[in-house]
Image: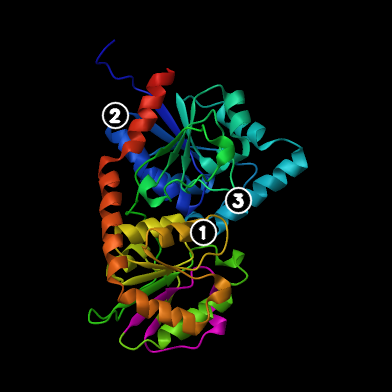
Amino acid sequence: MIGVRLMFQFAFFMLPEPGHIFPSLRVAESLVRKGYSVFYISVPALQSYLNNRGFQVHTILESVLPMADPGDLLTATEGTIVQRQILTHLDITGRSLAELFAEELRRLRFDLLVCDSGIIHTCGDELQRILGVPIVSLSVVLPGDERTQVPSIPEIVLCPQEFDIPGRIWNPRNANCQTFYAEPSLFETRGEKTSSHENVSIDKPLLYCSFGTQTLRYPEAAQVFANIVEAVSRIAGCQSIISWSNNRSLLSSVDPSPNVQFVQNASQLEMLKMSSLFITHGGLGGLKESIMCGVPTLVVPFDMDQPNNAARVEHHRLGYRCSPSECNPAMIRDMVIALLSDKDVLCRVGHMRSVFWKYEFSAPASDFISHTATALS
């Protein structure tokens, strides 16, 4: 009937990692505000966290995964450990990932599955065939050469297209795939366990450095970390806060300096709101946050989507890039000093910031999901 909204039930199935869970929550909350029913499918360790955010949770893989502290899953590399445990289980049982997930999901009732693109790229076609329900892929990374999109499954990319490089074909083999760029989906109320960061002076530029929660994966990280500390220690009139996250070994190769503070888990958004420069590995989540806070970046990309993201930052002149092999103290010091006085970069960051917030306020991802459900019903 014309004018009657169909009340669909949507299920969200995201990888249990902070960079995947947090952006999805804002999209899910937007659907709830529009009157739709939303629940999460997740691992047991995240049930209480998601319940506290107001979502019903259907837990899966109880017999496969041991219990973990939800704080660990949302601040450290436990999500990677979970993936290893699942793959080990598949090797032992001889089943496919799609079969494992489908067995768990078939007992649930929903009209459309919003599924992490990391899962879709691995087994999306088979999962959709087994479940027989519409699926929308939700991606927290931009299209890149290293992945293969499933043509039959539309994909929402949680980042404005303006941040991508115009005319660049990231995935030519799937040129006809349905890709919808949306809002950055910045989830601010995370409930993070954060370290204190006192004695920040309002009279000095603040340099904030973080390589995310997975520094243990980067063999070069310790040397780059030490070089950054040495470089920023030499910059007069500046102060620095450097997050070592879950990798305490990074501290073993650095000498303390009076203008550098080390913290384990800083509240990144709080830090960026006070910062003049962000030194980062180039994960998309951190780059979106820095843009939305109007902060230029110095990107030191290691792997995965980070080199492509660094290319985007460089293309749009939102900051500079430096490969890990070139990041000696002198190079870093020169780039930091140049960035702090680069008015063109600051202007371009301000423009991109306004673009990002325009998308954030319009929140098109939830509309895309509801329209897709209506079209397929």
Residue at which label 1 appears: 306
Q: Note whether 361 is above or below 131 in the view shown.
A: below
Q: Note whether 39 is above or below 347 in the view shown.
A: above
Which comes sooner in the sequence, label 1 or label 3?
3
How much space separates mark 1 and mark 3, taking CA atoms? 22 Å
Residue at which label 3 appears: 82
Place of residue 157 in the rendered image (x, y in percent of width and height, measured from the top left): 43, 42
Looking at the image, residue 220 sits to the left or right of residue 167; the answer is right
Kindly identify the amino acid type of the residue bearing the numbered disc 3.
Val
Which comes sooner in the sequence, label 1 or label 2?
2
Place of residue 77 in the rendered image (x, y in percent of width and height, measured from the top left): 55, 59
Magenta range: 238-260
Kindly identify the amino acid type of the residue bearing the numbered disc 2.
Gly
Mark 1 vs mark 3: in front:
1
SS for dot 2: loop
SS for dot 3: helix
How much space separates mark 3 and mark 2, taking CA atoms? 33 Å
Kindly identify the amino acid type of the residue bearing the numbered disc 1.
Gln
SS for dot 1: helix
Query: Is residue 256 one of those drawn in magenta?
Result: yes
- Judging depth in this view, the residue of 12 and 339 nearest the camera is 339
Residue at which label 2 appears: 35
* Mark 2, other Cα within 10 Å: few <14 / some 14–19 / many ≥20: few
Which comes sooner in the sequence, label 3 or label 2?
2
- On the image, which quarter does residue 147 sit in? top right
